[in-house]
Amino acid sequence: MKRALITGITGQDGSYLAELLLEKGYEVHGLVRRHSTLNRSRIDHLGGTENLHLHYGDLTDGVSLVNLVHAIEPHEVYNLGAQSHVKVSFELPEYTANTDAVGTLRLLEAIRAAGIDCRFYQASTSEMFGATPPPQDEGTVFYPRSPYGAAKLYSHWVTVNYREAYDLFAVSGILFNHESPRRGESFVTRKITLGVASIKLGITDHLTLGNLDAIRDWGYAKEYVEGMWRMLQHDEPQDYVLATGIGTTVREFAEYAFSHAGLNWEDHVRYNEAYERPTEVDALIGDASKAREVLGWKPSTDAKGLAELMVDADIEQLGRLVAHKQEG
Ligand code: NDP
Ligand code: GDR
């Protein structure tokens, strides 16, 4: 039985990847951070699964990583753990670098110290392209525009370096934005779909956003974790872009979401400059030809479909909460 270790298992991608690997018959080990209250809502439904094991650890604590890798001896490690919010990285630059950059180095060193034959996946990001105009692919010049993007770029290069220096099967997946009903509430897509649900249910009458002109290439997270897994099953370790190839503005995403609920976005969206970033990434549109040709990976959900499935999920979930409160 294959053993996998996932950092970031409590996050959006970690929860979908854990489901996928369990379905494939893996023994899945997840690194979880200590919180004052448990925050495992995305993996609660997997509770009691025989092949799922959770361990306390932290990417800022090298000893915990060394001990875990040594004890588990994983065949595959997926490094998804990160302070993943771009705007927050301007407020927590040092912590972001510690987790998103040095954390990767610590994990790679833990694998090396264990002397095991282990494949490594690094969660790299289109944010590394930053100011370089689209379309972006594996050969595009990097130009990060945030402490998050710069930290992730370190991790990308150190992953490449460990592959070349130590012959480690290490892969960097450069993923463009991917979303789902499990997306954190402070990312713009989920903020919009939750806002739509709250307005539809009469809880509020508006939603406040920042830059509506930014262009992103939004795909569905569930389809992207399949791509991560495929990267580690290939004969050779290589880097890949995963994207839909379609650019959509924040404004268009809002239009899709509001109109799906029978609402006009212009009646409800307000602007506040507090949501702007000191340096913005204007446009990210990926070219995933390599992943399609080499891995046979192809996304099937576009931004409109994504907005609609997220709105449906939020109206249903919030509706249940409201009904529950009224009963109580
Ligand atoms: P989330 O923010 O949903 O999840 C991040 C995960 O990392 C959580 O499980 C979190 O734990 C964990 N984490 C945070 N800090 C630490 C730490 N110091 N030590 C260990 N674990 C930590 O992110 P996503 O699931 O959306 O993204 C997964 C990865 O992919 C991230 O690295 C992200 O930067 C990257 N990425 C994401 C893209 C996207 O569009 N979603 C696109 C490209 C890259 P906790 O629950 O305890 O907070
Ligand atoms: P991003 O995602 O920065 O691309 O990083 P986010 O959803 O935060 O922002 C996308 C764009 O929307 C604009 N925007 C707002 N953003 C937020 N969060 N809140 C708002 O109110 C708002 N209004 C407008 C932003 O300025 C930006 O242009 C995500 C993360 O998942 C990263 O971890 C990942 O690496 C990249 O995607 C690819």
Image: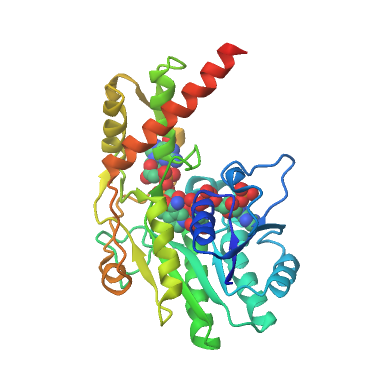
The picture places residue 201, in percent across and down from the top left corner, at 42, 17
Q: Which quadrant of the figure contains the N terminus?
A: bottom right
Q: Nearest the camera: 17 or 147?
A: 17
Residue 288 location (% of width, % of height): 28, 64
Q: Is residue 126 visible?
A: yes
Measured from the top left, where is residue 283 in percent x and y? 29, 52
For the point 38% across and 52% down, the residue is 177
Residue 121 vertical placement versus 39 (above, below): below
Between residue 61 and residue 305, name the one nearer to us: 305
Residue at 56% x, 12% y: name it: 326
**Horizontal arrangement in the rendering, residue 142 relative to residue 288 (left or right):** right
Frontmost residue, 5 versus 278: 5
Residue 298, quarter of the rendered image:
bottom left
Instruction: Residue 67: name its quadrant.
Output: bottom right
User: How many numbered markers are drawn?
Assistant: 0
Provide residue 183's location: percent of width, then percent of height. Answer: 47, 43
Q: Is residue 293 left or right of residue 162?
A: left
The colouring scheme, among rainbow, by chain, secondary structure or one colour, is rainbow
In-image side of 196 versus 81 (left or right): left
Q: Quadrant of ligand 2?
A: top left
Q: Is residue 205 above or below residue 281?
A: above
174 or 225: nearer the viewer: 225
Residue at image position (51%, 75%) is 159
226 over 259 or under it: above or below: below
Figure quadrant of the C terminus? top right
Image check: 288 left or right of 104? left
Image quadrant assignment for residue 228: bottom left
Can residue 144 be seen in the rendering of this structure? no
